[in-house]
Amino acid sequence: MTDDAMLIIDPKAQIIRHASPQAMDLIGPTLRTEDTPLGDVFLNEGNDLGAFLAGALSVTDPLLSGVTLAPDKRTLSAKGSRLSLDDGSALVLLLLEAEPELSSRFRLLADKIEELRAEVIRRVAAEKGQTEYIDSLHRSVSVIKQLAELDVSSGDYLDMTAAVISSSFQSHGTAVIAENLGKLRVLAATGVFADIFPNQPTLGLSLTEFTGFSEAQADRWKELLVSHMQHAGADHVSFANALVMPLPVGGKVRGALICLMANDGQGRTNVRLESDLISEAIGGLMARAEIEAQLMHAQKLHAIGQLTGGIAHDFNNILAVVLGNAELLLYELDSIDMDVAREIREAAIRGATLTSRLLSFARKQPLQPVPTDFNRLLREFDPMIRRTIKENISLEIVSSAGLWISQVDRNQLENAVLNLAVNARDAMPSGGLLTIETANTRLDNEYAERHSEVRAGQYVMIAVSDTGEGMTPEVAREAFTPFFTTKEVGLGSGLGLSMVFGFVKQSLGHVKIYSEAGVGTTVRMYFPRDLTELENVDTGDATSHESMPPAMGHILLVEDDTGVLRYLTRSLELLGYTVDGVTTAEKAIELLQGQRFDLLLSDVILPGGKGGAELAKVAFELAPDMPVLLMSGYTENSIVHHGRLDVGVEFISKPFTREQIAKRLKGLLAR
Amino acid sequence: MTDALPQPLRTPAIQKDYFLRSILRELVGMLEQTVGEREAEAYVNHVGISMGRILNEDYRTAFGSDKLDARQVAATLVDLKARIDGGFSITEIDSDKIVLENTACPFGDKVVGRPSLCRMTANVFGHITAENLGYARVRIDKAIARGDPGCRVVIALSKADETSGPGESEFFVGTI
């Protein structure tokens, strides 16, 4: 009949008398073919539908309006026309359209325009955001570039950092806060902060308290920091628009940057991005400054070590002559005043101890590392320590169970512990507690990155702690420097900790001082764990106390220092040996080619092409059974590799006493 | 501050009435272009019926009568147009018809080219007449909107023998 969606409505009865199939498709199952109540199909809010149908019924011209379907609230376009019946009554013919085509197009167009408008707004906003992002990056890069150009070795690099940040953020007050001796301190300040904090005050807040908050609690640590800033003098400063950013150094928060902004970063939508980038850059700068400072310190110590080693070498030769001649005097001239000669010898021995420590610091002391159980060594060494400290000091040795083994020179380790014990004793004049403890530990990559010369790995730790006066940061920084001492003149050589430092470093370990004035000091020594299989760990030194040997034998003595050569020749002859003395390796080789010797005793460093080590090799070829003993006041790579003697090389340090050389010779000749 | 603002040399034509008529002209023009003249007329029919309903109630109240007689209806049609600046007058009135002529359209010159607006007059007149006199058949013989110098509206009060012819609209009592 029709292709239209058509309804025939009886407005008076409020019934849809007839519905075309298209109308049923359009409206859905609520509409029946015949006699569907009008209210089931259409909404009639405010009688709009009633008025429309009444209007349509009242005129022969069609009326157009919109109607709303009851089930799903869809709006349809409706054209109502009066349908006059033969009996004089009338119905309304309603033609429905889902949407008039043009209206539909216009609506779609309007929707599209609205979408486009929204898209344009979105894109404009995105472009604006991108521009701001790029601006932020430019600003950040500019700041980072300026920071990178700062000389971190200068003492005021943090002041310059604060100035750069202040300028970039147009801040009227910037403060750099970082850890110093466990407490946070205002290390640099500009603007209003410069007036309030001229002397780098501490904030009474430890780093642990400060960093104890999780990332989710970032606001709380900011509040805590601000409250301590206010307490420290900034109570009249408004922190309302303060930008507070953490400073990560080496991956850990070590401080903060506070920037007082003119407004709340208004106009800078990427303040967070900028502050993150810049705080990372400042953290990197601080890390670089720390490493450079450590490196400079290490270089300084290295330079001093070089100097010390050189002095010690010459000094040892002098001492050797003094010592040797004093002994000869004692031996040969019973009639003269023996006290004088004894004093010469005592002085020489003190000098030898001094150079030994210097060599330790210079990392040129020949070490004889052996697998060592630190706990056992400490047990056996315990009486010596107790004799060293005073009665008013309690000693506590805390031995960690299952302690790893480390390869160390036991004598030097004992010396190091003893040195630390003496320092601890002197730091506790009124008594206290001396604790020596051992533990297995691991120095991780992060720690190694922050400390030059440290390799990450497993270490055996031995720590010596006291409850004494502690050190100021300045003292702690210089503690390993040779001849630096806080003791009264004559009470300390200033070489104790230097020896410890040199020994530990030469043993491929690490040493660290933790000290706080008024609380105490802990010195921790870390030695690399020995991972080789240990068959026989023995701490015993097996010191022999045999009496002087009745010596016999022919010794070839090689020594370039004629003073040392003369006294040694005499000393050895007095011991009963026959001695041929020469000053160069070449002369010694000539003699070795012509006759047989029972032992070759040679200095390590000799003039000419060959040194002691080369001479020993030649001697081994010429006389394989002849023992060789090398001696030196100074050891170099010719016999010492990384501070350890080559396997099979016998060595004695100069200066030595007659008894010491006699024992070594006897032992070698007896083989 | 206001004193400092510049004043136009001549008073512009824009007034509230002028402004509203201009809007109406633009809206109807848009409607005719969008849905076509016939469909636009159907929309205006609906609006005209609605307006007729409102005005009828007003004039019944004004006359103090539930139903107006023919003369009251004629007076109503002239008066309501006069009130909105129309120039309608009765040229004929009898039991069969009321004939009105107009010299000034309430929409002014804005009606020219907008013939669908004539449906407003036809529906208002037809609805008021039918509601009071039981039936109306309206025919617009001349229209300013179509370019005629004036309008001529004939309202027949009795049914024709046959269905209404072209240009004629029949109105019935619309109360449901």
Image: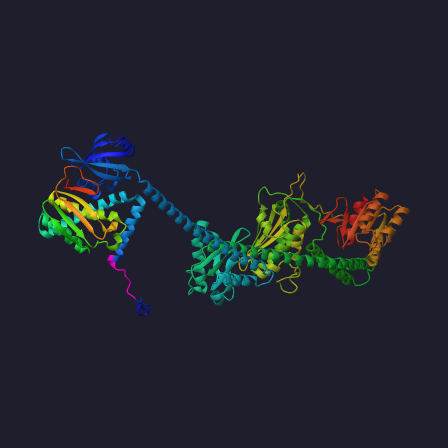
Q: Nearer the viewer, residue B72 or B61?
A: B72
Which residue is depicted at the point 14% across and 51% down?
A: B91
Magenta highlight on residue B11 = yes
In the drawing, does residue A653 fall left or right of residue A455?
right
Secondary structure predominantly adopted by residues drawn in magenta: loop
Residue B16 visible in the shown view: yes
Residue farthest front in this picture: B149
Question: What is the magenta range?
Answer: B10-17
Q: Position of residue A86 (x, y in %)?
A: 15, 33
Q: Quadrant of the N terminus of chain A?
A: top left
In the drawing, does residue B173 fall left or right of residue A438?
left
Q: Position of residue A606 (x, y in %)?
A: 82, 54
Q: How many marks?
A: 0
Which residue is depicted at the point 62% across and 55% down?
A: A420
In this rendering, the answer to whether A237 lies above or below A583 is below
Residue farthest right in this picture: A594
Q: Position of residue A671 (x, y in %)?
A: 80, 42
Magenta highlight on residue A542 = no
Residue A470 visible in the shown view: no
In this rendering, the answer to whether A262 lies above or below B59 is below
Q: Nearer the viewer, residue A567 or B101?
A: B101
